[in-house]
């Protein structure tokens, strides 16, 4: 009986050890930006045996992003979204990895695709945040004007939300989109003031180009 249990334990450990070795190999290749090596590793029989399809495709995507191969990265994103079965957590992981890069590049086709994917999940907070940023920064819209203004002007809400400065920034951009320079300037200054010393300070400064020099 003890021998049988020991055999079961050893057999159960084999996939774990193989997976760990495969991941370590992947990380070494990734560090070297060895795309061909990563592609061969992910295509191996071992990888296909012990890793789900999403994990394999995500590993490839990471390597393309790290190597700044935008064409391969976008092709991989499209393949994952259209062909790879994903649960809600996997969709959120994928979206968080790529969404903000497409925002930075003003790639509306891809940001829309990611927002649509997240709308089909139960990750409501992530979907709302991405839809808000996409509508405000890429589409130049004002869909979230009332919601943001209500939250930003609510003292109780302000006291418990650490991202209040970024919401102020988005509100400033919305007013800029609406050609209301007075309100845009008001919320821009609030965002700059309230972001000082927070994790949002550098993000807001990096996105000030969304507000023209007259604001």
Image (tube, rainbow, N blue to C red):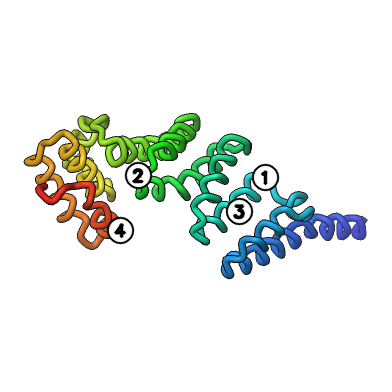
Is 140 drawn above or below residue 39 in the view shown?
above
Q: Kindly identify the residue that appears in the image at 13 percent across and 51 percent down.
A: 213
For marks 1 and 4, give the CA distance. Answer: 34 Å
Q: Kindly identify the residue that appears in the image at 27 percent across and 59 percent down.
A: 202
Q: Give the mark toward the camera: 1 or 4.
A: 1
Mark 1: secondary structure: helix
Q: N-terminal of the two: label 1 or label 4?
A: 1
Q: Is residue 201 left or right of residue 72?
A: left
Mark 1–mark 4 contact, CB under 8 Å?
Answer: no
Q: Give the mark toward the camera: 2 or 3.
A: 2
The residue singled out by tag 2 in the image is 106
Tell me if I can see residue 45 in this picture.
Answer: yes
Q: Kindly identify the residue that appears in the image at 30 percent across and 58 percent down.
A: 199
The residue singled out by tag 3 in the image is 60
The residue singled out by tag 4 in the image is 199
Tell me if I can see residue 156 in this picture.
Answer: no
Asked where in the image residue 5 lies, by quadrant, the reply is bottom right
Is 108 drawn above or below residue 197 in the view shown?
above
Q: Kindly identify the residue that appears in the image at 62 percent across and 69 percent down.
A: 28
The residue singled out by tag 1 in the image is 53
């Amino acid at each position: 009986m003890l021998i049988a249990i020991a055999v079961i334990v050893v057999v159960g450990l084999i996939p774990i050890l193989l997976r760990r070795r495969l991941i370590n190999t992947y990380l070494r290749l990734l560090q070297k930006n060895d795309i061909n090596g990563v592609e061969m590793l992910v295509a191996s029989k071992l990888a296909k045996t012990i890793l789900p399809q999403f994990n394999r495709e995500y590993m490839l995507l990471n390597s393309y992003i790290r190597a700044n191969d935008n064409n391969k990265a976008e092709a991989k994103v499209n393949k994952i979204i259209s062909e790879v079965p994903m649960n809600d957590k996997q969709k959120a992981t994928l979206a968080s990895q790529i969404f903000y890069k497409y925002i930075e590049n003003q790639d509306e086709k891809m940001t829309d695709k990611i927002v649509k994917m997240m709308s089909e999940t139960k990750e409501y907070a992530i979907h709302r945040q991405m839809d808000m940023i996409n509508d405000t920064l890429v589409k130049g819209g004002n869909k979230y004007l009332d919601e943001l203004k209500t939250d930003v002007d609510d003292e109780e809400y302000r006291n418990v939300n650490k991202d209040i400065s970024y919401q102020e920034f988005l509100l400033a951009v919305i007013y800029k989109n609406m050609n209301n320079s007075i309100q845009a300037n008001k919320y821009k200054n609030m965002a700059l003031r309230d972001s000082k010393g927070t994790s949002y300070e550098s993000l807001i400064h990096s996105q000030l180009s969304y507000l023209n020099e007259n604001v």
